[in-house]
């Protein structure tokens, strides 16, 4: 009889994502883990929510702020070209693909400390114009305002691609 797989944690899954830069599917994760089945990982992800607030709560004690710091905003499209029924998948422009593809849009805010050459993701938003009516630029503006007025972070400039 096979032993029951251990319960997967957020740390386990994040470690997998950090080590697998190309294929981050549930199947690949399960194939490269002696402890977790595909079903166990799927159940974990279905019940876990890593909200922007939780990201900040987990990173704020590690961020080393300096007056010369930068906020970097990046809009990324997670390629889901072969998906058929995943929520939030829409056709959108991808700079990496140099064209339209089916994917999920994510806008991230990264704090960069150029003195220590460290950086931290401090916020993100999912691009869902049908659900919230916001453009990617609206999400960036919201995160910038929140960083200035609520987080009260120190930085010299804002960087983003156009």
Image (spheres, rainbow, N blue to C red):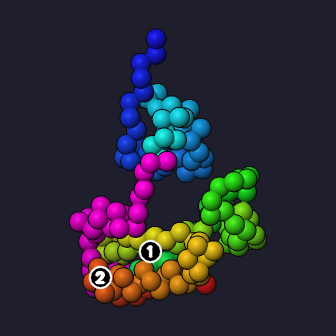
Residue at disc 1, secondary structure: strand
- Quadrant in the picture for residue 69: bottom left
Question: Measured from the top left, where is residue 146 in percent x and y?
Answer: 36, 82
Question: Residue 109: which disc?
Answer: 1
Residue occupied by mark 2 = 150
Left or right, 127 with reference to 5: right
**Residue 159 seen in the figure:** no
Residue at image coords 61%, 76%: 129
Residue at image coords 62%, 64%: 88
Question: Residue 139: which disc?
Answer: none
Left or right, 91 with reference to 38: right
Magenta region: which residues?
Answer: 46-70
Which quarter of the figure is the C terminus placed in?
Answer: bottom right
Question: Measured from the top left, where is residue 112 in percent x and y?
Answer: 38, 74
Mark closer to the observer (2, 1): 2
Q: Is residue 63 magenta?
A: yes
Q: Nearer the viewer, residue 114 or 105?
A: 105
* Relative height, residue 32 to residue 26 (above, below): above
Q: How many marks?
A: 2
Residue at image coords 56%, 42%: 26
Question: Measured from the top left, where is residue 61 in percent x and y?
Answer: 23, 66
User: Which residue, as the protein is rendered here, is positioned at the far left?
Assistant: 61
Q: Residues within 10 Å of mark 1 (few under 14, many from 20)?
A: many
Q: Is residue 57 magenta?
A: yes
* Relative height, residue 32 to residue 20 (above, below): above
Nearer-N-terminus badge (2/1): 1
Residue at image coords 48%, 35%: 40
* Relative height, residue 96 to residue 15 (above, below): below
**Residue 93 seen in the figure:** yes
Q: Residues within 10 Å of mark 2 (few under 14, many from 20)?
A: few
Question: Cα distance, mark 2 to mark 1?
Answer: 15 Å
Question: Measured from the top left, where is residue 10 in percent x and y?
Answer: 38, 47
């Amino acid at each position: 009889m096979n032993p029951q797989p251990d319960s997967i944690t957020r740390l386990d899954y994040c470690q997998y994502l950090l080590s697998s830069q190309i294929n981050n599917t549930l199947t690949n994760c399960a194939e490269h883990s002696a402890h977790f089945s595909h079903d166990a990982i799927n159940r974990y992800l279905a019940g876990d929510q890593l909200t922007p607030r939780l990201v900040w709560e987990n990173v704020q004690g590690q961020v080393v702020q300096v007056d010369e710091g930068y906020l970097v905003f990046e809009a990324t499209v997670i390629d889901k070209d072969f998906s058929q029924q995943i929520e939030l998948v829409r056709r959108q422009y991808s700079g990496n693909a140099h064209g339209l593809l089916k994917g999920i849009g994510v806008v991230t805010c990264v704090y960069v400390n150029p003195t220590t050459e460290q950086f931290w993701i401090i916020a993100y938003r999912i691009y869902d114009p049908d659900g919230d009516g916001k453009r990617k630029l609206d999400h960036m503006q919201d995160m910038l305002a929140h960083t200035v007025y609520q987080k009260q972070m120190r930085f010299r400039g804002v960087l983003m691609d156009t």
